[in-house]
Amino acid sequence: MENQAFIDSLMKEIINPGVEQLMNTRYFTELRAGKLSKKRITGFALQHYLSNHVINKGLAYCMVKNASNQAVYNQFVELFTEEQSHPGLMKRFGLAMGLTEADFENGIMIYECVAHTGAIIRGMFVGEQAETRAGALVNETMVQRYSEEFDTALEKYYGMDSRARTFFAVHGKVDKEHTAMAAETIAKNANTDRQKEAVRVAARNMVRFKVAKFEGIYDAYA
């Protein structure tokens, strides 16, 4: 893969340290120990459900926006096809944890989740290809890791069966393909010094948004 050294540096210097920063937040420290409150777990389910819906709408828009560019259009079609079921899987988890249909119908995104989701949509709509996929590389890498954490803890401490945990089982595996896709797109399209710097900035920003999302959920659902 072209620019492999650049991708390796992104992972080593920004993304992998960001993953560890996320895993060391209060949210995941308590989750691993089985001490995270049910309210904070269901808070994540609701907020992530709302975010997933927005992201799917963004992907649908990008499919139309890029209809004349077959390669880019195909990429958004693939992403939308894989992501469209995820709000439903997150709702299944939330309902198993005690939320109701009314909770999902009436849910409102908290500030930090608006910021995180807004950054993703901004990248989709106005970012260059490499810059846009930098955010995806961060998010997909983090989701893969925290899905494994959720899957383990939910079974061990919270009695969630495999059906309720489907969202996390899927993301622990599928997002490996998504990270590879994002890395390939960055490698192909980050060819100038400015493009590479835009990728680095986008990756650093997305790490901050993702960490802030979980800190925000932790505080909002105290």
Image (tube, rainbow, N blue to C red):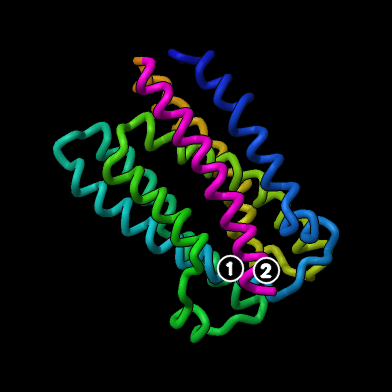
Location of residue 175 with respect to 5 vertically, above or below = below
Horizontal placement of 91 versus 218: left or right?
Answer: left
- Residue 96, image x and y in percent? 65, 76
- Residue 23, image x and y in percent? 72, 47
Inspect the image, locate mark 2, and give the three-letter code of the amino acid beneath it.
Ile
Q: Which quarter of the figure has residue 129?
A: top left
Q: Is residue 47 magenta?
A: no
Q: Are marks 2 and 1 in contact (CB under 8 Å)?
A: yes
**Which residue is nearer to you in this view: 88 or 54?**
54
Q: Is residue 204 magenta?
A: yes
Please, what secondary structure does the residue beneath circle 2 have?
helix
Location of residue 105 with respect to 115 vertically, above or below = below
**Which residue is nearer to you in this view: 211 or 171?**
211
Residue at 32 percent across and 51 percent down: it is: 59
**Which residue is nearer to you in this view: 36 or 84?**
36
Residue at 70 percent across and 74 percent down: it is: 222
Q: Which quarter of the figure has residue 34?
A: bottom right
Query: Secondary structure of the magenta portion, mostly?
Result: helix
- Residue 152, image x and y in percent? 77, 55
Please, what secondary structure does the residue beneath circle 1 have?
helix
Residue at 47 percent across and 69 percent down: it is: 109
Q: Residue furthest left?
A: 68
Q: Which residue is mark 1?
A: 45
Residue at 73 percent across and 69 percent down: it is: 160
Q: Residues within 10 Å of mark 1 (few under 14, many from 20)?
A: many
Horizontal placement of 162 versus 72: left or right?
Answer: right
Location of residue 40 with respect to 79 vertically, above or below = below
- Residue 189, image x and y in percent? 34, 22
The disc placed on residue 41 is 2
Q: How many marks?
A: 2
Q: Which residues are magenta?
A: 193-222
The disc placed on residue 170 is none
